[in-house]
Image (cartoon, helix red, strand yellow):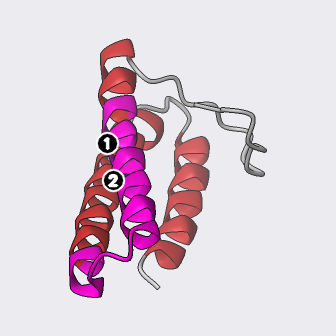
Amino acid sequence: MSHGHPRSHSQHHHHHDPQEKRALQIRLSKVAGQIRAIDKMVDADIDCAEILTQIVSVRKALKSFAEVIIQQHTESCIAGTSDPLEGQRRLKELLTVLRRYVE
């Protein structure tokens, strides 16, 4: 799902099932819409508590999105590899990312 953004250092390319990809894109579109709404709320000087409530909602949506990505990556990219050494490398890579994710 590269949209003109630089790729990470990883050489691994994940190909999502078209239905999975569409579901991920729908989730991201909703989050993007929530963020645009927050921007409009700030511009309109809406009460801070209401803005913070929307921020909580966005954080929960992103957490849920990340959980789906983690699960798909674990099942498809780590468990699904035919090379045990490649599986170990991918697991180490995931653990490194997860350490940053939980900080």
Residue 78: quarter of image: top left
Mark linked to residue 30: 1
Image quadrant occupied by the N terminus: top right
Who is closer to the viewer here, 10 or 64?
Answer: 64
Report the amino acid beneath label 2: Gln
Report the amino acid beneath label 1: Lys
Q: Residue at x 47, y 37 (%)?
A: 77
Q: Secondary structure at mark 1?
A: helix
Q: Position of residue 74 (x, y in %)?
A: 37, 46
Who is closer to the viewer here, 92 or 60?
Answer: 60
**Contact (Cβ within 8 Å) of mark 1 with mark 2:** yes
Q: Position of residue 91 (x, y in %)?
A: 50, 56
Highlighted range, magenta? 25-52
Using residue 21 as the reference point, say whether residue 8 is left or right of it. right
Q: Residue furthest top?
A: 18
| Whether residue 2 is visible | yes
Residue 75: quarter of image: top left
Q: Which residue is mark 2?
A: 34
**Up/down of 90 relative to 57, above or below:** above
Q: Position of residue 3 (x, y in %)?
A: 66, 32
